[in-house]
Amino acid sequence: MLDFLRYTLERLPRFWKRVILISFDAVALIVALWASYALRYAVWMPVITEERVFLALIAPVIAIPIFIRMGLYRAVIRYLPDTAIWTILRAMGIATMIWIIVVFLMEMAGRGIVPRSVPFFFFAIGTALIGGARFAAKVVLSHGTGMRRDEQPVFIYGTSSSSVQLAMALRGNGNRFVVGLLDEDPTNHGRDVGGYRVYNPANLPRLIEQYGAQEIILSLSSISADRRKSVISSISGLGVKIRTVPDITDLVDGRYLANQIREIEIDELLGRSFVPPDPALLGGILEGRTIMVTGAGGSIGSELCRLIVQWKPKKLVLFEANEFALYKIDRELQGLKHCEVVPVLGSITNEPRVRETIRRHGVDVLYHAAAHKHVPLVEANALEGIENNVYGTMVVAKVAFEEDVADFVLISSDKAVRPTNVMGATKRWAELIVRHMALEAQRLGKNQHFCAVRFGNVLGSNGSVVPLFKQQIAQGGPVTVTNPDMRRYFMSIQEAAELIVQSSALSKGGDIFLLEMGEPVRIGDLAENMIRLAGFSVRGPENPQGGIEIKVTGSRPGEKLFEELFYDMANALQTQHPKILRADSTAIVHHNITEACDRLKAAMAVRDETAARTILFDFIGMAPGAKATEI
């Protein structure tokens, strides 16, 4: 009955809501005057006289216009602030004073005497009825059983001032309804903070069932990354969505809107420590220079472009073979107006187009991100993978060398270490090609730096398992994994871009930089965490009916159980950046890459995939001492 009444009232037009309020106030003031006489004479039914009826009727006639003038009917009862009690006191006080003047005039006219205590009773009882009714209605509409049918019950994890401000902000935004706060501190359990009850997170399963909560919002920006990871892990898998918000100080500083509650990203569970980028490294390599990025429309290339334009380069050249990808990143960057952005449509295997672009724009720094990276696709299309990844790199590096590009950076992969697939092998060849160009530059005394940056999987990149898992979860499953025991390195795409640029600033020529990727992640655990973060349970022996199933499809050709970042960890040297390691170039053996490329090119010319595969793998596997000394 109460829910039906509340549902009906909330959907009334604003005009009729005001009519109801005014009618209630009129009746309440008449009742207040009757109660004042009853208290004064200590009888339930005081004597009714013509004067008392007149005074009772005149009370709302006096008070209602004052209430209107002071805004008591403009306020939305559901969001009535506590400070409104002072407005009610002032309005009731003014109304009582005018009513007393009317009483005084009546007494002068000989129309009867009003006991002196009645005005005081009238003020007190009227204030209690007018104010009490409003705040009681606010409690019913905004707390406990006052949740609207279209609202989703949520808990906020945290009891800081930021958490309370977030709860207050949610009252007027969207359809979330805060049923309480969560805090591990036992001294806070059972207390009210900002008008919200504080609960023990250990009781969450019971609380979720009791309140029907569908979401938990984390307001824990001030705690450490490890502690945050622990909290997320402890509450995931309860069948509710887990979201988070930035620090409330960001709202004050204008850096986000109050309704920017976002989903927990999977990288927040990876436990990676954050190291702020070094402005000196970024500015030194980018500011005032002409930068070219190949594969500018890809996931890594586009993120590099977004980072580069923030550092005021002289010009940014976007080189991309995919027309739509080039259009998207060009349109995005042109809107920023940070520097001149030049879109160039072309393939990295087209030497005249590459040379024309570098020469026309006077490129100073070149980031080579263009590559075919999807392992199964490259495995099934080996000749195309070799053509793009090996000869495309050879073309871009050779032209950059001949056109005196000062800094050349190859974006490599952890799959280049002891590769078992075509994609990884082509990336290893690309590394050796870049090192060969660096040695040539050193031999000729040219002030050019050629280097490669090697790292693992990037969350959210094209071909990454994370977007695939998200799509499968959104469709209700199953989530497909080739082997749940596979382990992969992951980092965020923004961190990868920052570290790539900083690595290039550290290059001395011929370097292979290795980005510190933390601990490898088990793919089965990644899938389970993503399912739980989405608010679902994992279907299995303990939960055979509900949840989302994880389906094992079996390893694909060329896939390794474990990826590696190093041939030999002993040859990794520290740099001034804690997340960037450098290969000890003195320990790297020399490969005759020119002769190997000629043999590979001959096999490619006759489209002999078997011979091309043999040359591809034999060269990097049979090089003297490769397994012992390479990094």
Image: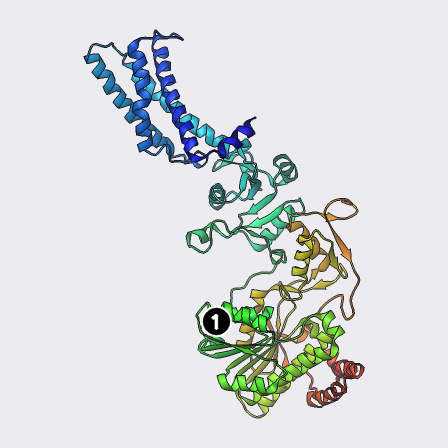
Q: Residues within 10 Å of mark 1 (few under 14, many from 20)?
A: many
Q: Position of residue 18 (x, y in %)?
A: 40, 31
Give the vertical position of 289 relative to 439 (above or below): above
* Image quarter hosting the C terminus: bottom right
Residue bearing mark 1: 309
Q: Quadrant of residue 320?
A: bottom right
Total numbered circles: 1
Disc 1 marks which amino acid?
Answer: Val
Q: Quadrant of residue 424?
A: bottom right
Q: Position of 63 compared to 444: left or right?
A: left
* Image quarter hosting the N terminus: top right
SS class, disc 1: helix
Residue 138 appearing in the image: yes
Q: Nearer the viewer, residue 457 or 38?
A: 38
Q: Position of 120 compared to 474: left or right?
A: left
Who's the residue at 34% across and 34% down the image?
71
Model colouring? rainbow
Most extreme residue toward the bottom is 444
Q: Quadrant of residue 450?
A: bottom right
Q: Position of 483 compared to 143: left or right?
A: right
Give the vertical position of 184 relative to 119 (above or below): below
Q: Position of residue 501 (x, y in %)?
A: 54, 73
Q: Nearer the viewer, residue 571 or 50?
A: 50
